[in-house]
Image (spheres, helix red, strand yellow):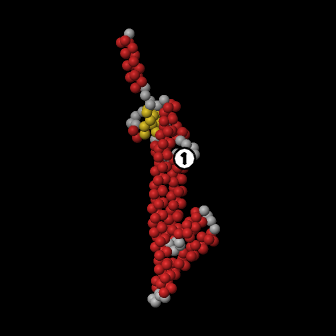
Amino acid sequence: MKKLLLVLTIILVTGGVFAQQIAYIDTSVIMKSEYITKSYSELETQNNIFQKEIQIRQDNLFLGENEITDLINLAQNNGDQAKITEYQTTNNKRYEELNLLNQTKDLTEEQKNRLTELNNLRKKSNENLQSRAETLGEQMQSLMSKKGSEIEAAIMSACEKIAKEKNYSIVVNKDAIFYGGIDITKDVIAALPKE
């Protein structure tokens, strides 16, 4: 009797090992799914906002920080075009004034002070530009890392859900399969978050 139970146990255990079903996913297809492309589109939109701010700062080095901040807000929110033009005109006038003062040979004391003021304004704007570019770059890296983790977690969760529902023991990437296995890529895509 003990031998019979032992033989049955061995048959059941080994049969269970051989009965494991292996599923696979094609990550290249999953990366083209709506959830993933929408996630990366959101990142691209945020990157474009950051790049636009940097470009505005580069193009307007003769505006003070309050002026440039207001200009950026107006430009990013499709604000008052007349006010945007006014800021750009102010920037251009200050730039032209600096060039004119640099070409003048005998500057008055007042002109020297104004030249120093404009040079300091440009220097401070350049410093703010560099600082803001670093900050925005770090924020973009953080957003990309966070979004990457969210995507990975969503794919893992979807794989786990489908594996449990359909009794798959193992889910691997398609590249790891030479022969056999069951493709659950479409099921995983369907199980990804909709929002």
Q: Residue 76 at x, y = what percent?
A: 58, 63
Towards the viewer: 159 or 115: 115
Q: Residue 178 at x, y = what percent?
A: 39, 36
Within the image, what quadrant is residue 3 found in?
top left
Q: Can residue 135 be seen?
A: yes
Q: Which residue is mark 1?
A: 34
Q: Can residue 185 be seen?
A: no
Q: Is residue 168 above or below residue 110?
A: above
Q: Is residue 116 above or below residue 28?
A: below
Towards the viewer: 67 or 12: 67
Marker count (numbered):
1
Residue occupying the point 49% across, 39% down: 157
Amino acid type shown at disc 1: Glu
Query: Would you call the spot at circle 1 few (<14 residues within 10 Å), some (14-19), or many (20 or more)?
Result: some
Residue occupying the point 58% across, 64% down: 73
Residue found at the far left of this picture = 3
Q: What secondary structure is found at the residue carrying circle 1? A: helix
Q: Residue 106 at x, y = what percent?
A: 46, 89
Q: Is residue 11 above or below residue 34?
A: above
Q: Residue 20 at x, y = what percent?
A: 43, 28
Q: Is residue 40 above or below residue 93?
A: above
